[in-house]
Amino acid sequence: MSDDIEPASESPRPESLWLATTPTTDYDPLEDGLDVDVAVVGGGITGLSAAINLKETGRSVAVLESDRIVESTTGHTTAKLTSQHGLYYEPLASRFGEEKARQYANANEAAIDEVERRVEDAEIDCDFRRTDAYTYAASADDLERVRDEVDAARRLGLPASYVEETPLPFDVDGAVRFDDQAQFHPRKYLLAIAEGVHGDGSYVFEETRALDVDPGSPCRVETERGDVVADDVVVATHFPVLDRAGYFARMHPHRAYLLAVRIDGTVPEGMFYNTASPPATMRPYSVADDTETADDEDEALLIVGGQSHEPGLDGPPTSERYRRCEAFAREHFDVESVEYRWSTMDYYPVDQVPLIGPIDPLSEHVYVGTGFKGWGMTTGTAAGMILTDLITEGSNPWADVFDPQRLTPGASAKRFLEENAKVGGSFVGDRIKSLLASLGSDGASNIPRGDARVVRRASQPVGLYRDDSGTTHAVSATCPHMGCLVRWNDAERTWDCPCHGSRFTHEGEVLSGPAVEGLLYREL
């Protein structure tokens, strides 16, 4: 990628394409508590997939979403439905063995079929389309790894082949192709699923934040609007709201950036990922059915992005990450305009395998689905299937590889120490830096409009943000989750926690957890 390529002069809409092309939901909040068979905490793809499956077994279900369903991580995805997760299967089989690697592969292939089945049975108009997926070598040095991945995937029964040509308008050294994968519009799909959940004794509740889970018998979910009592609980909140098993130390957050661009020429058919560090991702999107966006029935956009990194650690600001994504797009395509830009947060387990199953050894009836490492559309769907089987049948043929209580010291010990050392360094280092920082009485006025900084006032770290009108907003800079200091995200204009990924508005309101409380507002 050339850093000399200049970004476009026009301003893209700072909004997810999926949110921009679907209506806002308006489900009622919980009132005065409720008793159901299963409480599902989280209204993304994992929670809604589990909820519809459980309802179809005859269970009554209540989905509890802190804000609006399908607007958080699921609403900010690339929306690929694929069992191809980069160069993944060769290292997975080496660390876990081929039997468990096959469980992982089969679960993700079954998830694609599950979405297709529901789309056809319910006639859901969500732009579902079968297509091929490619992971191509970013340089010739990666070709051996690509060939090893093809061999491993084929041994596991996946539809993999080695190719030297792709539909991309530029040459690649080689790629692994998975046939018969899929793409879709996740909000169109899941809003239809939510309609199927809500009613006949089951519910979808919005603006109902879960604060804690009591894993008793029965279980009890504490919310801001009353308690939900249930025989079983599914925690599908991206980061578990109940964390007695140390999930904060077993997963680390990654943020990635996406653009929807209009190009001059044909948008390539297929889904693409490369072996660069950080990797780039691409897929087409047809806007023919979106009257707000389409000019004619043949128009399409290209979603392109990447720049995955651990939030808040040393590196370029968010605005530079978007610039680099645009530079990549302009280097490889004739970009006419950038229509949308958005970012997404994913959690990566230290052993690189999602955590799906009983949440901890002491909580018999509480289950979790998390740690999808950027591939949540497929693995989140699989999680809904696995958790339904565990609740209703007590077993699932794919569950072993995803067991949250697994012990994988060979696969994860080094990564565990590295990631938690980084978190510890951020926690301690930030505090030392903040001790050295202070502002005089006129310090707030020295912050440029639209910018922010963390300072220390009255022995407390404070985040100061000066908005475009010149008004300064002050909040506590200490994340209420575990006490790390938040840092400013200059593109989204949010306070982000570098330790575990919580995000807050400039006024301190929680945008995403694991924090369940906001940053306290401070008087200047």
Image (spheres, rainbow, N blue to C red):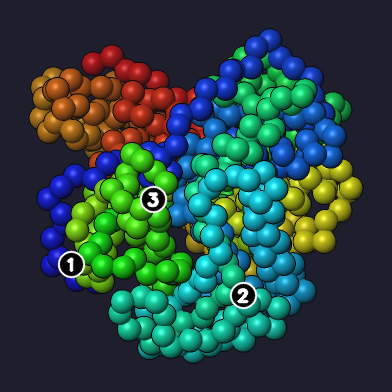
Relative horizontal placement of residue 99, taking residue 296 as reference (left or right): right
Disc 3 residue type (three-letter) = Ala
Residue tagged by mark 3? 288
Q: Which quarter of the picture shows residue 522?
A: top left
Measure how far apart labels 2 and 3 are at the Cα level: 36 Å
Q: Quadrant of the C terminus?
A: top left
Q: Position of residue 15 (x, y in %)?
A: 34, 40
Q: Residues within 10 Å of mark 1 (few under 14, many from 20)?
A: few
CA separation, marks 1 and 3? 33 Å
Residue drawn at the location 32% of the way across and 44% of the way down: 293
Marked residue nearer the N-terminal end (1 or 3): 1
The residue that appears at 64% across and 27% down in the rendered structure is 204
- Please tell me which residue lies in front, 120 or 71: 120
- The x and y percentages for residue 391 are 83, 43
- First in sequence: mark 2 vs mark 1: 1
In the picture of the structure, the residue carrying the numbered disc 2 is 89
Q: Residue furthest right?
A: 393
User: Is disc 3 placed on a helix, strand or loop?
Assistant: loop
For residue 216, above or below residue 35: below
Considering only order in the chain, which callout, 3 or 2, is on the residue closer to the N terminus? 2
Q: Is residue 404 visible?
A: no
Task: Pick whichever, 502 or 7, lies toward us.
Answer: 7
Question: Is 236 placed above or below 441 here?
Answer: below
Q: Secondary structure at mark 2?
A: helix
What residue sits right under mark 1 in the picture?
Answer: 3
Q: Are marks 2 and 3 in contact (CB under 8 Å)?
A: no
The residue under the point 19% across, 35% down is 451
Q: CA distance from mark 2 to mark 1?
A: 33 Å
Where disc 1 sits, the SS reads: loop
Residue depicted at x 24% and y 45%: 12
